[in-house]
Image: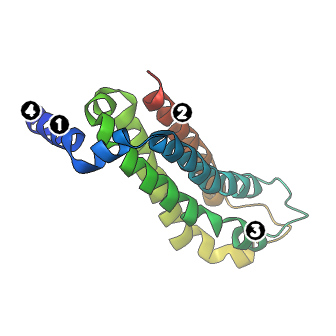
Amino acid sequence: MVLVMDDVFSWLEDGWLAEAVRGTAYLYPMLGSVHVIGIALLIGPAAAFGLRLLGLGRRALRVTTAANHLLRLSPLGFVIAAATGVVMFPPGASLIADRGSAPWKLGLILLAGLNVLIFHRRTYRSVADWDTDQPTPAAARLAAVVSLTSWSGVTIAGRLLAST
């Protein structure tokens, strides 16, 4: 299995996309910059919403208002971060895959995604009961903690991937 993956990584590193990224002046650092902007658009609003679920601004801001204004940006941020991450991977596929933080980053992204799915399909359905001036239910607080923790871990793992 390792040999097969090594072949895939070599194929990616030798491919046209990797050559284009390596061979175009300033493309890789520009992709990295846009990647960070995507991360900010994804994690910033998600973190602010998570803090609201944990009680910050409970008396001043309805949960639905926070969700409507903040969470609209996160899918765009995810698309930007994912697209730039996919394009930045081939030039250093073998090196990135060898780093111990790569499976952590991917696993934490999956955990964060599952958390979003479960929160919106289950917990958020009853938001009318706790939208304003009510204590946030334990399931919503747990979702906030999982979100804040997993996205922080994704960020740390990503920085470890980028360091040499």
Give the residue at mark 4: 3
Instruction: Point out the frontmost of discs 4 and 1.
Output: 1
Q: Does residue 94 lie above or below 110 as drawn? A: above
**Tag 3 and tag 4, C-beta contact below 8 Å:** no
Give the residue at mark 1: 10
For disc 1, the neighbor class at 10 Å (few under 14, some 14 to 19, many from 20) is some
Kind of residue sitting beneath label 2:
Ile
Instruction: Point out the frontmost of discs 2 and 3.
Output: 2
Q: Nearer the viewer, residue 120 or 12?
A: 12
Kind of residue sitting beneath label 4:
Leu
Residue appearing at x 42%, y 48% in the figure = 85
- Report, in whole angstroms, how far the alpha carbon at label 3 lies from the one at label 1: 48 Å
Mark seen at residue 63: 3
N-terminal label among 3 and 1: 1
Instruction: Point out the frontmost of discs 2 and 1.
Output: 1
Q: Does residue 70 lie above or below 29 as drawn? A: below
Instruction: Point out the frontmost of discs 3 and 4.
Output: 4
**Tag 2 and tag 1, C-beta contact below 8 Å:** no
Q: How far across and down, in percent of the image, does residue 162 sit?
A: 46, 30
Instruction: Point out the frontmost of discs 4 and 2.
Output: 4
- Quarter of the picture containing the C terminus is top left
Residue appearing at x 32%, y 34% in the figure = 92
